[in-house]
Image: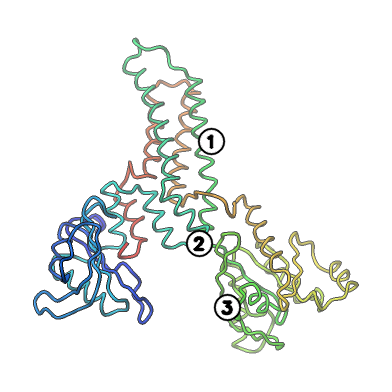
Amino acid sequence: MSELFATTGTIAAIATAVVPQQGSVGIVRVSGTQAMPIAQTLFHAPGRQVWESHRILYGYIRHPQTQQLVDEALLLMMKAPRSYTREDVVEFHCHGGIIAVQQVLQLCLLNGARLAQPGEFTLRAFLNGRLDLTQAESIADLVGARSPQAAQTALAGLQGKLAHPIRQLRANCLDILAEIEARIDFEEDLPPLDDKAIISEINRIAAEITQLLATKDQGELLRTGLKVAIVGRPNVGKSSLLNAWSQSDRAIVTDLPGTTRDVVESQLVVGGIPVQVLDTAGIRETVDQVEKIGVERSRRAASAADLVLLTIDASAGWTPGDEEIYQQVQHRPLILVINKVDLVAESEWKTLQSQIPNFKFQIPTAAAKNQGISNLETAILEIVKAGKVQAADMDLAINQRQAAALTQAQISLEQVQTTIAQQLPLDFWTIDLRDAIYALGQITGEEVTESVLDRIFSRFCIGK
């Protein structure tokens, strides 16, 4: 059996990031029947402070045998069921860094707790009925959110905006199943089953499932982000474009071609979508061994990117080098960035337009002067939307596990419709209908297996 199901006993873990000379506060969280006794053993509260639930105490953490002072800290106690796990929970709020929290954790482990598995606090919250699986997954998404929109979508899931429609769809399927089974068991005492009404209801449920499935791509974008590679010949302004876009000096900019020798990354947010921008080395034939490695990495980055920004120098026109790179990346989603337009006269611009291939998205920029960046972001969002993915203003987005279960439910409902059309006995209707109910139950946790829980909670960090 998976270690994730070893949920007996009292668990403890550091619940905050441990970074030397960085964090001002470190929290050690303890949950289980021994949480309160451990707190009473380790924590000394001076004066007449009252030990009661949901009260913060000030005091000292001491080694119970030697009475050696470990830290000056705060203690927060939360009695079951009014806690994250619905068990007794205590938190030691220590000084940040490495030593203090590690020492407090070790004392907790020496006095009756064991080290928590990844996600075990949230797993206990699920098993104790405080959260369903969609809410648990939303917690993981919230912790890992890379943009405000991703955080808002995760919060919506945590508030039950995904669980509610899933439960309603499952309840509707259960109602249909009850109607059918009633006719099987009490056929003589009930009026005939309304086949048309059953089919209409199944069609409605299937349509709602289709709407939920349409949010899968949105969810993937919000969780993993969009990888964008800036490619082009040396000295066309790729690094200047990255710096202007990220409003930083991430990349070195000189008039010398071949300055960028490796892929430079920058994390941005465009329309609520996390974007990983890769500034690549200029692609050209070279005898310089180091530059050759950079060029090869540029090609790999372009082939792995979700979107390629092919950047050219407007003052140089469309060159054979540009054409060669275009042939290498034309199979990828593509935006042509025509940089250095501030150096081009109107007559030269018309000549350039006649030279370049027919790109759907052509964005003129003057990166050195921070011009054209907003138009570039607009083009990126248009490409995202062209893939039927909404970039923002969505309050839920399903993940891959949820999409797989919804797809299975949809297939099962289609099979029910086929069974009805073939006029098979009512017993056959119930088989696929039960499969649809089971698939929908997997999403929220009404139907759950150890492997599903293992897959979900193993992605969590220890302490959450």
In the image, taking residue 163 as reference, residue 279 lies left or right, namely: right
When the figure is inspected, residue 265 is found, relative to residue 306, above or below; the finding is below
Name the residue type under label 1: Ala
When the figure is inspected, residue 66 is found, relative to residue 156, above or below; the finding is below
Residue 218, visible in the rendered structure? yes
Which is more toward the observer, 310 or 7?
7
Name the residue type under label 3: Val
State which quarter of the image contains the N terminus.
Answer: bottom left
State which quarter of the image contains the C terminus.
Answer: bottom left
* First reached walking from the N terminus: tag 2 or tag 1: 1
* First reached walking from the N terminus: tag 2 or tag 3: 2
From the image, tell me which residue sits under label 2. 224
Q: Which mark is residue 207?
A: 1
Q: Position of residue 282 (x, y in %)?
A: 67, 80
Q: Which mark is residue 264?
A: 3
Label 1 environment density (alpha carbons within 10 Å; few <14, some 14–19, many ≥20): few
Q: Which mark is residue 363?
A: none
Name the residue type under label 2: Thr
* Residue plotted at (41% across, 46% down): 160
| Mark 2 vs mark 3, CA separation in Å | 19 Å
* Residue plotted at (70% across, 70% down): 310
When the figure is inspected, residue 26 is found, relative to residue 414, above or below; the finding is below
| Mark 1 vs mark 3, CA separation in Å | 44 Å
* First reached walking from the N terminus: tag 1 or tag 3: 1
Secondary element under disc 1, as helix, strand or loop, is: helix
When the figure is inspected, residue 166 is found, relative to residue 201, above or below; the finding is below
